[in-house]
Image (cartoon, helix red, strand yellow):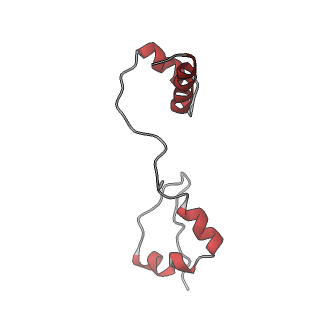
Amino acid sequence: MAKRLPLTDADGEVRELTEDDFKHFKPFSSLPDDLQSVLRGIGKQKEPTKISVTVRYSPEVLAYFRATGKGWQTRMDDALKEWLRGHTP
């Protein structure tokens, strides 16, 4: 039996798959249940907790929050909620 080629190269790039590669793949349903649940992820939200909108902010505000790294949009949302607690509409 011929040795199969690795699916990725040294840089982690996936090579073009061949018919022989597909013959060795397992169907998703044959994987253990715990692995299936991990691969499925959390799935689509049944009821979204946030609403997507388009808003314009000053460059200074965006630069400040973006500089805080990943999760900056959540931190901006938290800051706005905190502001709302101290102000009335």
Residue 71 location, x and y as percent? Answer: 56, 34
Residue 44 location, x and y as percent? Answer: 47, 56
**Which residue shows up at 56% across the image and 80% down it?**
30
Above or below: residue 58 compared with residue 44: above
37 or 89, which is in the foreground?
Answer: 89
Q: Judge whether residue 76 can be spotted in this image.
A: yes
The image quadrant where one finds the N terminus is bottom right
Residue 15 location, x and y as percent? Answer: 45, 62
Above or below: residue 25 compared with residue 42: below
49 or 19, which is in the foreground?
Answer: 49
Above or below: residue 49 compared with residue 15: above
**Which residue shows up at 54% across the image and 33% down it?**
74
Residue 49 location, x and y as percent? Answer: 49, 44
Above or below: residue 34 compared with residue 51: below
The image quadrant where one finds the C terminus is top left
Q: Quadrant of residue 83?
A: top right
Q: Judge whether residue 26 can be spotted in this image.
A: no
27 or 58, which is in the foreground?
Answer: 58
**Which residue shows up at 45% across the image and 77% down it?**
22
The residue positioned farthest toward the front in the image shown: 88
29 or 54, which is in the foreground?
Answer: 54
